[in-house]
Amino acid sequence: MPRAHPIVYDALIVGSGASGSWVAKQLTEQGMRVLMLEAGPPRLPTCDFTEHVRPYQIKYRGFGNRQALIERQPIQRLCYACDEFSHQFFVDDHENPYTFPVDKPFMWIRGRQVGGKTFCWARESYRYSDYEFKAASRDGYGEDWPLSYKDLEPYYDKVESFIGVSGSREGLEQMPDGKFLPPMNLSCGGRLAREVIGKKFGWIVMPDRVANLTLAHRGRPACHYCDECQRGCYTASYFNSPSVTLPAAARTGRLTLISDAVVSHVLMNAEGKAEGVYYLERMTHAHREARAKIVVLAASALESTRILLNSRTVRFPEGLGNSSGQLGHYLMDHFTLEGAGGFLPQFKSSRREPRGTPCGFLIPKYVNTGSHVNKNFVRGYRFDGDGSQELYAHAFGLAGFGSDWRRKVRTEIPYYFGITAQGECLPRYENYVTLDSQKKDAWGIPVLHVVASYGENERAMAKAMRNDVLEILDAMKLQDPQPPREALSVFGKNIHECGTVRMGKDPKKSVVNSFGQLHDAKNVFVSDGAVFVTQGCYEPTLTIMAISARSADYIAHESSKGSL
């Protein structure tokens, strides 16, 4: 028999990342006793953070143990942020498998630790607008969100004001301004792009809006520009939940956090109400139960969906919350066109541009906004880019030898300019996850089978994206310009997976309401990217945090009335 935790908490949260930590902060500050379960271990800056470690200080000089990475992290190692310095922030793929059809590859990048993926996220923080929340009303495709920008605006304000987001105010309807710290500076390449692209196309080129501090904020110092954010941050100068939101919850004295707790399923009673969750200790595999009046799943979009699918009972034979048949469907992830760029010969120099800015530039979505309509597809895309000088990397391709060659290496450091386009993925029923009928993870829990691919709308959008990128490359007058790769990015590669537990007003078309509350079980909530109805072309994390803060306020209010 599994051992039950002796305390019945007011609320139990599964997951300690961006979403779970915000729910914990809001609930504990409103007087609720909260238990948080995290599948992975805690991370210690003195042991796990490596932003100031140099290659000569580690065993494989930054290249990593290739054999070990291929064996234990064959998927995770493909992430741009996973290397010898940071691989500890990513899961062991051998312990955490999943499956997909041979002809529909899916890349699932995961972080299991206290803080989730907030140690190594790219920190880009953009508000959604009614171009996202009411997209169906604009173009007729799919469903609207059951909330509007006006509903979420005060929670965007709350989140930005607390975590610290640097950015510029641009007055764009499609990308609302927020409560910003001063923006990061653009690089030389970024400033040139702003001048050239603004003049030729009339598009705004702006610094990325990022959760990096440009000023000291709430006891945390400003960014010191070491440019290694994916390795952790000793000074907590970018948002990660163990440095920002979890301490706020802990200070109330009402948060209990259990790490290394791998949740299998939600425990339901005969009346269809949740009583807690069933979990296994990560290291010992011992079986445990935790009890609470309210259960909040904030384990990431696909992990929360997996827990619901595994929560099968006589009352819920297809998974908890799945009376509509919608659970697991409408999976989305952004797609990108990558590899475009070239050299700016006017910036080649023996002196390098000061490095360390943890962001580049953004060209906001312009297509299918206002009068800019493209009839070949619905929704839209944006661009990211930057310029940089990599010290001595050019030496590998520089002909010659001897003292003259060494002089060229030192004095002719090239300046590279790169640009990427990122587009919106439509929510489609045929993009879904379900439980694999045979495969299980290291703790005996059935794993996900993911079936997802991009459709005709994404391919039509990609053509327009490619044409725009080529025009930008031409306008920038680059030396040795390289066009973007033809292939779209692999589904999941952008680590923005959303959908599969989408919210809605109609229980027949959705799984949860606008507060993430299951239509089928009023004391079970989902508070992460799983609830998204559409995705837009911007990063989802800021919206995930705002939705989580809003859901938590609703939970606290309803709990105080005894309605849950």
Image (cartoon, rainbow, N blue to C red):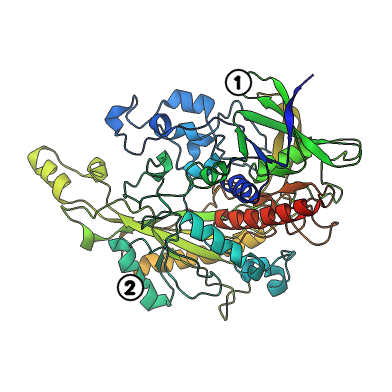
Q: Which mark is residue 283?
A: 1
* In this picture, residue 560 sits left or right of residue 350: right
Q: How many marks?
A: 2
Residue 137 at x, y percent in the picture: 72, 73
Percent of width and height locating residue 153: 60, 67
Graded by Cα atoms within 10 Å as few (under 14), some (14 to 19) or many (20 or more), the crowding at tag 2 reads some
In this view, the residue in front, 268 or 347, is: 268
Of the two numbered discs 2 and 1 on the same chain, state the one appearing first in sequence.
2
Seen at 55% across and 56% down, the residue is 542
Q: Is residue 347 above or below residue 322?
A: below
Screen quadrant of the N terminus: top right
Horizontal and vertical percent for residue 267? 80, 34
Q: Is residue 531 above or below residue 87?
A: below
Q: Residue 480 location, x and y as percent?
A: 31, 57
Label 2, label 1: how far apart the Cα atoms are = 55 Å
- Say which amino acid is labelled 1: Met
Evaluate if marks 2 and 1 touch, with contact meaning CB atoms under 8 Å apart: no
- Amino acid carrying label 2: it is Glu
Q: Image point 35% across, 39% down: which residue?
A: 51
Element type where label 1 sits in the image:
loop
**Is residue 208 shown to the viewer in this render?**
yes
Q: Secondary structure at mark 2?
A: helix
Q: Which mark is residue 195?
A: 2
Is residue 339 shown left or right of residue 146?
Answer: left
